[in-house]
Image (spheres, rainbow, N blue to C red):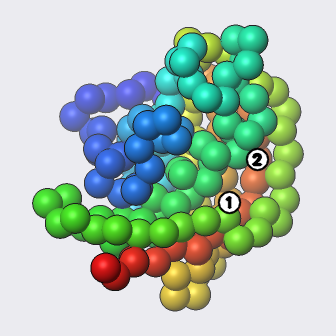
Amino acid sequence: MEIKEENIINIHNFLPHREPMLMTDYILELTKEKVITSFEIKEGNIFVDKGVFVEAGLIENSAQTCSSILGQSFFENPETDTNVIGFITNIKKIEIFSLPKVGNTIISKASLISQFENICHIFCETFLEDELLIRSEINLFIQEVKP
């Protein structure tokens, strides 16, 4: 997938995650029911071991990609200091086929299967070019935390 700069959405507007736990760089496409993200794997990443992005990193990348679908309703106004909490409630299915290396840019594509209030069931696949790296079905919970 070619990344066009004019189509990139700032991930910080849709996720509470920050370094070193931010595992997505850009949102390439976002609707109420699907999202596509990109992520360049760098040497200093906490999920890199011996030059390889390990399984936990792929799972976290998938979860963050998925949560931006639900998170967009909490981060519609970037100037607002919104505080949210979110977590994986269930991994229904996960298949890991290959692990990317430092310097690779992965593309994750997620689509909403179902949603009930702040809980959603999402399908996600992550690719390195045309190679499928991981396929998962994840349930996520996200909600705003009031001070």
| Residue 114 visible (yes or no) | yes
Residue situated in front as seen by the camera: 135 or 82: 82
**Residue drawn at x 54%, y 18% as measured from the top left:** 44
Image x and y of residue 116, in percent: 58, 87
Residue designated by label 2: 135
Q: CA distance from mark 1 to mark 2?
A: 8 Å
**Residue drawn at x 52%, y 61% as measured from the top left:** 67
Residue designated by label 1: 123
* Amino acid at the residue labelled 2: Arg
**Residue drawn at x 78%, y 63% as measured from the top left:** 91
Please identify the quarter of the rendering in which residue 66 is found: bottom right
* Relative side of 104 to 37, left or right: right
Callout 1 touching callout 2 (CB < 8 Å): yes
* Relative side of 5 to 135, left or right: left
In what element is the residue under mark 2? strand
* Relative side of 32 to 8, left or right: right
- Residue positioned most to the left: 79
Count the marks: how many?
A: 2
* Relative side of 75 to 118, left or right: left
- Residue positioned most to the front: 147
* Amino acid at the residue labelled 1: Phe
Q: Residues within 10 Å of mark 2 (few under 14, many from 20)?
A: many
